[in-house]
Amino acid sequence: MEIDISLFLEKLQEEIKNYKVPIVELVSVQTRDPFKILVATILSARTKDETTAKASKRLFNVAPDSETLATLSQDQIKELIYPVGFYKAKAGYLSKLPEALKVFGGKVPRELDDLLTLPGVGRKTASLVLNVAFAKDAICVDTHVHRIMNIWGYVNTRTPLETEMSLRKKLPIKHWQNVNTILVTFGQGTCHPVSPHCNRCILLNMCPQKGVKPRRKTI
């Protein structure tokens, strides 16, 4: 029997209000600047939120927009964003970003296919920018979304891309903008990839827990 996805997401929306919010959502609260949201999203890949926040602040203090970013060398960018994950590769992406944005008048584009032409931008990053910077309906699927949707049995997929395609067909559009924030926050706070806190999960009595073992025992 398939879960009531709206019920699950609405319960978690309330549950995570006191959880730490992922870095890109924090940036969006502080600024609606698409450029800063795009850069922070690129920096956040495989990097802890605290590290991303500090690196973003250092970089934006020096280069708050595309024009000033263009004046920095790759080595300068590298120094500013260290120690984010894959900082050397990300410095390369960011050094090429101002030139790539010239195609769009120096602005961050508002369409998925256009975003995907930018250096260092994959489907997850592009969808998240559309969600956070432009409030557009796009499904951002990272490892937490992929993993939790499979634990719930809402999808039966092998990769995040397969999960995105499946969710596009069946997830109610009203959830497209917030599903990533909800499940990333929930995944970091309770439904961990290893030894999740099933004992304190508000969905414990409803969750199919597919493939979840070992589980923390209820005390």
Image: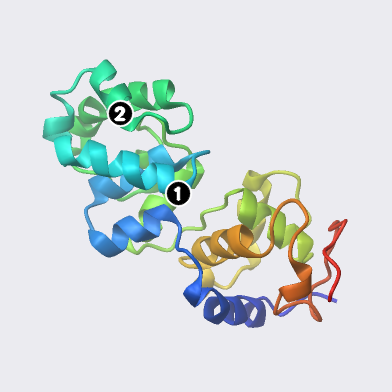
Residue at x 84% of width, y 76% of height = 219
Element at label 2: helix
Res 209 label: none
Instruction: Tell me if residue 113 comes above or below residue 89 in the rendering.
Output: below
Place of residue 154 in the rendered image (x, y in percent of width and height, measured from the top left):
74, 66
Residue 44, x across and y down, in percent: 44, 42
Q: Residue at x 47, y 38 (%)?
A: 122
Does 23 sit left or right of 100 as displayed?
right
Q: Which residue is mark 2?
A: 94
Is any part of residue 165 visible from this angle?
no
- The disc label shown at residue 49, or none: 1
- Comes first in the chain, label 2 or label 1: 1
- From what the image shows, is residue 38 above or below residue 171? above
Looking at the image, residue 200 lies above or below residue 64:
below
209 with respect to 41 (left or right):
right
For the N terminus, the quadrant is bottom right
Judging from the image, what secondary structure is the residue with disc 1 in? helix
128, 219: nearer the viewer? 219
Please state the horizontal and vertical placement of residue 46, each as a whole percent of the image.
53, 38
Q: Is residue 193 left or right of residue 1?
A: left
Q: Is residue 179 above or below residue 117?
A: below
